[in-house]
Amino acid sequence: MGNFISRKSFGVNSYRDFSDGKMILLYQVVHFILFASVSGDCVTELFTDTCFEGGDITTVFTPSARHCQLVCTHHPRCLLFTFMAESSSQDPAKWFTCILKDSVTETLPRVNMTGAISGYSFKQCSHQISACNKKVYVGLDMKGMNYNGSIARNVQECQERCTNDVHCHFFTYATSQFPSAEHR
């Protein structure tokens, strides 16, 4: 007979015979699969026509999948995201939605979905983290509540005002061709 020890393992009592190396090997393999395989590596790849299933935290609107990735990176719980592009749904209310997701294992099942783009936050990629998105999206009016309107000489001035305003998440620079005459 070998020596026996009682321990808590994954919430249940387990008894191991230390003279049997197979139990130790099994424990090491299970530990590797559950914990070490979730490497925390920097994954920058975006998965097109893919949706992460489950783990939804909240939904916000963003102009692109890369911007959705930045929003996820700066959210305290978000580890993964799915961005619904314009072509992902017949319902325009779902276009440009960014679904922030969380998972204890740092991954979720991938499901095929036309037009969806999914990826991981940059939390493991310190060289990728930046709060500023300098890209201008011509012809796109982001959904949201307008809380301030003013006249600006050009798009750069409008962008600078938004950047310097802690409450501004997006801006729309309305030219004379803007659909809403009220906002031109």
Image (cartoon, rainbow, N blue to C red):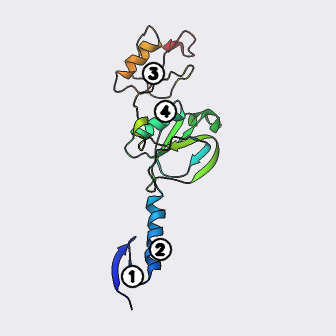
What secondary structure is marked by label 1?
A: loop
> What residue is drawn where x is 38% and y is 22%?
163
The earlier-in-sequence mark between 4 and 3 is 4
Residue 165 lies, with reference to residue 85, above or below; the image says above
**The residue under label 2 is which amino acid type?**
Leu
Q: In 3D space, how far apart are the residues under numbered discs 4 and 2 (Cα atoms)?
A: 42 Å
> What residue is drawn where x is 51% and y is 38%?
98
Quickly name the residue at label 1: 18
The earlier-in-sequence mark between 3 and 1 is 1
What secondary structure is marked by label 4?
A: helix
**The residue under label 3 is which amino acid type?**
Phe
Q: Residues within 10 Å of mark 2 (few under 14, many from 20)?
A: few
What secondary structure is marked by label 3?
A: loop
**The residue under label 1 is which amino acid type?**
Phe
Q: Contact (CB < 8 A) between labels 4 and 3?
A: no
> What residue is drawn where x is 61% and y is 50%?
111
Quickly name the residue at label 3: 171
Dot in front, 2 or 3: 2
Point out residue 32 in the picture as x, y percentages from the top left corner: 46, 64
Dot in front, 4 or 2: 2
Q: Contact (CB < 8 A) between labels 1 and 2?
A: no
Residue 183 lies, with reference to residue 169, above or below; the image says above
Q: How crowded is mark 3: few (under 14 residues within 10 Å), some or many (20 or more)?
A: many
The earlier-in-sequence mark between 2 and 3 is 2
Dot in front, 4 or 3: 4
Quickly name the residue at label 4: 67
**The residue under label 4 is which amino acid type?**
His
Q: Residues within 10 Å of mark 4 (few under 14, many from 20)?
A: some
